Amino acid sequence: MNSYVGKLTTLGGSVALASTRSRLAERFMIVGYVLAILLLDAFMLGAAFRLAYWIRFELRITISPEVVPSMEYYFELSMLLLLGCMLLFALTGLYNWHNLMGGTAEYSKVFNSCTIAFTLAVFATFVLRFFGISRGWLLTSWFVATLLVGTARFSMRRVVYALRERGFFLVPAVVVGLNGESAALAAELKRPRSGYRVMGLVGISGRGARDPVWLETDLDLPVLGTLEDLEQLVQEYGIRELVVSATALHRDELFELYERVNSVQGLELRLSTGLFELLTTGVQVRTAGAIPLIGLRKMRLDPVELVIKTAVEYTLTVAGLIVLSPFLALIAIGIKLDSPGPVIYRRRVLGIGGREFDAFKFRTMRIDSDRILAEHPELLAELQEQEKIKEDPRITRLGYWLRKFSLDELPQLFNVLLGQMSLVGPRMISPPEAERYGRNRYNLLTVRPGITGLWQVSGRSDLSYQERVRLDMYYIRNYSIWLDFHILFVKTVNAVLSGRGAY
């Protein structure tokens, strides 16, 4: 064990020096980004007010009585509303770095702040009789301002994600603990999108890597020391956050760590739940009396993401079925002419929350496939190991081409309409197969399975089973509507046309 830890431990001199030199540069970048967001908000709000003026008074798009416009009056009013919106942005934390990269909550705060500001303006028109505003201009300004500010912030976030891939905007951090959960946390936080630069791991005083899971994990991260070295490590490596593996510390050790962190300026403590396998669903914290309670959401997507994903998928699915209906009929006729048996094959699989349903596919196998497997035990062994057979004698002549270009999956569009599947998502699995996912199955069952997904467009059946599981977990943990669009309209088209890995 000591030799293993010694193997991982490095002098860290060059890393520490580089970290010290980059500390001020990183802080400068963060301040610069916040200032850029502030200026961008001001520009977008000003553009929204001017655009609303053009729509209302120059194009004269309105349903209300005609109002005589005054450019000077509306300019002054726009400046007042602009300052009001930006003050509300500041009060709701929209210029705080942690909130800027806080997911869809940022856009929700933008919407709420703009709504409050414009609601106050409407209220002012009722209370102050001399304060007159065109309702058409005000409503248009609210809509355009919310849209432009949200779009600008979304675009800036894409810039930060791209810069993180190049090593910028990453918070120096260490993972506290040397056990299986620590290894899983470190592996996930090493991904640039997480926003962390994991400098290494910190062990517990007097205890080493005692967990066999840790000993089998190659993270390529140094063990920097123990909790006694904490203040020195903060100085050397510029560490700003500690991510603590809750299962690696005893209760007394956690209290000791909390005391140490309180005495170190500029150091934040983040405590894992000890349920890393369920973290993808997100958590909700509420206080009962004086006790903070953590609740786990049963679904990975928040309400906003779910509404957008569902609306987009239903629209595309209905349009797809209308356009493809003649083609689907031709395939059905071809299946009936090619081999005896039903046109549709129903596969019993698990959906969100572990609920079972029948996934529809065009039949691509002979109806005596069970007999063929019984006569060839080596094929049965390959199927049990990989869930696929590369040279599968059970597949029909037409079935080969349907599988090659993934046309056998098209009936699953009806599963999407039934709310059982998504256009994009992790691969569907059967109830017996769930055991092979281990604890990862809890993540898998927090989202609907997809007709296409990350593993399907990354090599399909050429990938090992473990690689398919890894890609499914990556998709779930890094979900965004833009990742869906990229998989659906870029990756899927290339994968289908190439036919690579389809069997």
Image (cartoon, grey):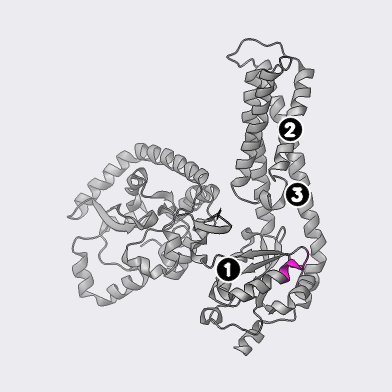
**Residue 366: % across, % down:** 21, 60
Question: Would residue 344 appear left or right of 93 to someone viewing this image?
Answer: left
Report, in whole angstroms, how far the alpha carbon at label 2 lies from the one at label 1. Answer: 41 Å
Q: In the image, what residue type sits under mark 2?
A: Gly
* Mark nearer the viewer, 3 or 2: 2
Q: Quadrant of residue 290?
A: bottom right
> Is residue 363 in view?
no
Cβ atoms under marks 2 and 1 closer than 8 Å? no
Residue 40 in view in this figure: yes
Quadrant containing the N terminus in the rendered view: bottom right
Q: Which residue is mark 2?
A: 84
Badge 1 amino acid: Leu
Magenta stretch in the rendered image: 260-265
- Circles 3 and 1 in contact, beta carbons < 8 Å: no
Q: Position of residue 141 (x, y in %)?
A: 66, 27
Quickly name the residue at label 1.
185
Looking at marks 3 and 2 on the same chain, the residue that comes earlier in the sequence is marked by 3
Callout 2: 10 Å neighbours few (<14), some, many (20+)? Answer: some
The residue most toward the front is: 289
Q: Any mark on residue 141, and which?
A: none
Q: Secondary structure at mark 1?
A: helix
Which residue has dot 3 on it? 33
* Mark sitting earlier along the chain (3/1): 3
Q: Please rate how many residues cluster around mark 1, counting C-alpha atoms within 10 Å: few if below 14, some from 14 to 19, many from 20.
A: some
The image quarter containing residue 162 is bottom right
* Dot in front, 3 or 1: 1
Residue positioned 66% across, 36% down in the render: 113
Quadrant containing the C terminus is bottom left
Element marked by disc 2: helix
Is residue 134 or residue 349 the one in the foreground? Answer: 134
CA–CA distance in space, label 3 to label 2: 22 Å
